[in-house]
């Protein structure tokens, strides 16, 4: 339930052991009604079974927690806290409600789950993996453990009175904040998941027992930490691609640079290619950014025109020489031309197919020869593969063969568990798009996309990250990610 005033938010827990009471509570707008209603419907059926209703009955267990005080020069906390805990029933809370009737589930672990599920850091991405990684983090981080203990103990103290609860909550809060500050001062990589978890838990503590001002303060800090960490989608996943080597062609700017940022956030070492001297400043800037944000990864840039088989071969040889292997290859290079077919010269035709088809073919060839078993190969194509339109004949036509290259190579590499896919964005909001388009044409392209906008590079980079991680079972496919610009 929520108690909302003009200056503060004080959500509180509600424990209920009566099915009818749960049903009544679920109809109140102040309760997470959709969750409570679902629980009532689900567990009413269970309670109708013989003896099943006993799981709603309350009982107590004694929970013992031992820890060391983290504050230098401060009065030591109790070395052991024994908290009798009320178990059973259906808890409705301001975060993510769920039934609790496991008699041996420690209170600390209960709140550790809540650290993952609070709305401010909740998201539709890989929640299961994130949850499993937090158990070890709670054990290894003094700051996170103290904050979890603070919230758990404060929650119990607010709803129960017991002589054995001998802990100074103000002192414990001080210890928790002190531990967070100490961890921030000594952290070698700016922020990590344990610190983000600790600050998230402090925000939830202030939401229940503090003021709106302190809650906002912690949420602002949490937002900044997640931004520095690389965004919500990388939260809990750092190290997922540790010791993996990713080669990204066209990786110095635009889409290639955003893909580099996504994979760097997961711990991948990066071999980034760019074409000409005009792109070198972008490469230098991106290298500095990546090394500052992700100092533990290795980043090397390579320059070259990839329109010949020998140049592509040299790129792979150089990367393997430097990194000893290649696990992921993402090819983003391409060239666009908008002209009536009657005006396209032979030189323009040769250039379009050399970049969009020939280079893609030989990158796939070298990737098939060098990528380690279980690796990933991804090529960026175009949404026009699912449509036909005038003036883009040479562009769409030179990209079309890549789809067939992808399908064939995926079959050849199946036995090595290497996935091979193509990603087809819509018109992207980058300098690559605008030179050949009039303002009227830009408006037309926008009108065909969801939300009346062009595809952004940040729409595509997370999809590439997915194909490099959880999407490993997808292979031989062309994935159209274009906001409905085209479909097939």
Image: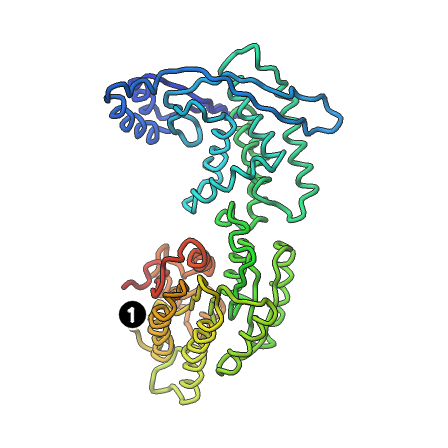
Front residue of 375 and 256:
375
Indicate the position of residue 269 as horizontal and vertical percent values. Answer: 57, 61
View extreme (bottom): residue: 346
View extreme (right): residue: 73
- Could one spot residue 255 in this view of the protein? no
View extreme (front): residue: 415
- Could one spot residue 67 in this view of the protein? yes
Which coloring applies here? rainbow
Badge 1: residue crowd in 10 Å (few <14, some 14–19, many ≥20): few
Indicate the position of residue 159 as horizontal and vertical percent values. Answer: 49, 16
How many numbered circles does the render carry?
A: 1
Q: Residue at x 57, y 10 (%)?
A: 163
Q: Reply above or below: 228 against 315.
A: above
Q: Reply above or below: 268 against 128.
A: below
Is 17 positioned to the left or the right of 220 in the image? left
Front residue of 279 and 145:
145
Front residue of 374 and 376:
374
Q: Residue at x 40, y 58 (%)?
A: 472
- Looking at the rendered structure, the secondary structure element under dot 1 is loop
Q: Which residue is mark 1?
A: 387
Q: Residue at x 37, y 78 (%)?
A: 398
Q: Residue at x 43, y 42 (%)?
A: 128
Front residue of 101 and 372:
372
């Amino acid at each position: 339930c929520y108690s909302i005033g003009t200056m503060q938010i004080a959500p509180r827990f509600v424990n209920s052991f009566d099915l009818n009471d749960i049903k009544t509570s679920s109809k109140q707008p102040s309760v997470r009604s959709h969750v409570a209603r679902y629980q009532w419907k689900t567990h009413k059926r269970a309670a109708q079974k013989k003896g099943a209703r006993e799981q709603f009955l309350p009982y107590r267990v004694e929970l013992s927690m031992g820890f060391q005080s983290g504050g230098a020069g401060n009065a030591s906390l109790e070395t052991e806290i024994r908290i009798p805990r009320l178990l059973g029933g259906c808890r409705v809370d301001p975060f993510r409600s769920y039934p609790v009737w496991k008699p041996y589930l420690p209170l600390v672990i209960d709140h550790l789950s809540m650290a993952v599920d609070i709305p401010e850091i909740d998201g539709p991405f890989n929640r299961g993996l994130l949850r499993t990684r937090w158990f070890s983090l709670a054990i290894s981080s003094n700051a996170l453990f103290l904050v979890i203990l603070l919230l758990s103990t404060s929650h119990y103290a607010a709803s129960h009175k017991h002589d054995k609860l001998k802990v100074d909550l103000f002192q414990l809060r001080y210890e928790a904040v002190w531990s967070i500050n100490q961890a921030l001062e000594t952290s070698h990589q700016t922020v990590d998941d344990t610190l983000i978890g600790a600050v998230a838990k402090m925000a939830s503590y202030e939401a229940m027992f503090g003021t709106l001002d302190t809650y906002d303060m912690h949420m602002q800090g949490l937002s900044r930490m997640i931004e520095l960490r690389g965004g919500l989608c990388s939260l809990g996943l750092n190290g997922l691609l540790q010791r993996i080597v990713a080669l990204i062609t066209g990786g110095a700017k635009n889409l290639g640079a955003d893909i580099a940022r996504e994979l760097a956030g997961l711990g991948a070492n990066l071999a980034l290619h760019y074409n000409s001297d005009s792109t070198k400043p972008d490469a230098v800037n991106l290298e500095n950014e990546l090394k500052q944000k992700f100092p533990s990864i290795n980043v090397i840039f390579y320059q070259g025109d990839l329109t010949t088989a020998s140049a592509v071969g040299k790129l792979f040889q150089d990367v393997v020489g430097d990194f000893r292997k290649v696990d992921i290859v993402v090819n983003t290079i391409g060239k666009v031309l908008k002209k009536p077919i009657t005006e396209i010269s032979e030189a323009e035709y040769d250039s379009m197919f050399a970049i969009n088809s020939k280079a893609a073919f030989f990158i796939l060839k070298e990737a098939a020869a060098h990528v380690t078993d279980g690796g990933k190969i991804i090529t960026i194509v175009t949404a026009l593969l699912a449509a036909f339109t005038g003036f883009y004949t040479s562009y769409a036509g030179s990209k079309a063969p890549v789809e067939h290259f992808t399908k064939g190579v995926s079959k050849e590499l199946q036995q090595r568990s290497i996935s091979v896919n193509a990603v087809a964005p819509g018109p992207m909001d980058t300098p690559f798009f605008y030179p050949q388009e009039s303002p009227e044409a830009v408006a037309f392209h926008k009108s065909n996309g969801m939300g009346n906008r062009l595809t952004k590079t940040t729409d595509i980079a997370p999809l590439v990250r997915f194909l490099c991680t959880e999407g490993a079972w997808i292979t031989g496919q062309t994935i159209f990610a274009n906001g409905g610009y085209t479909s097939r």
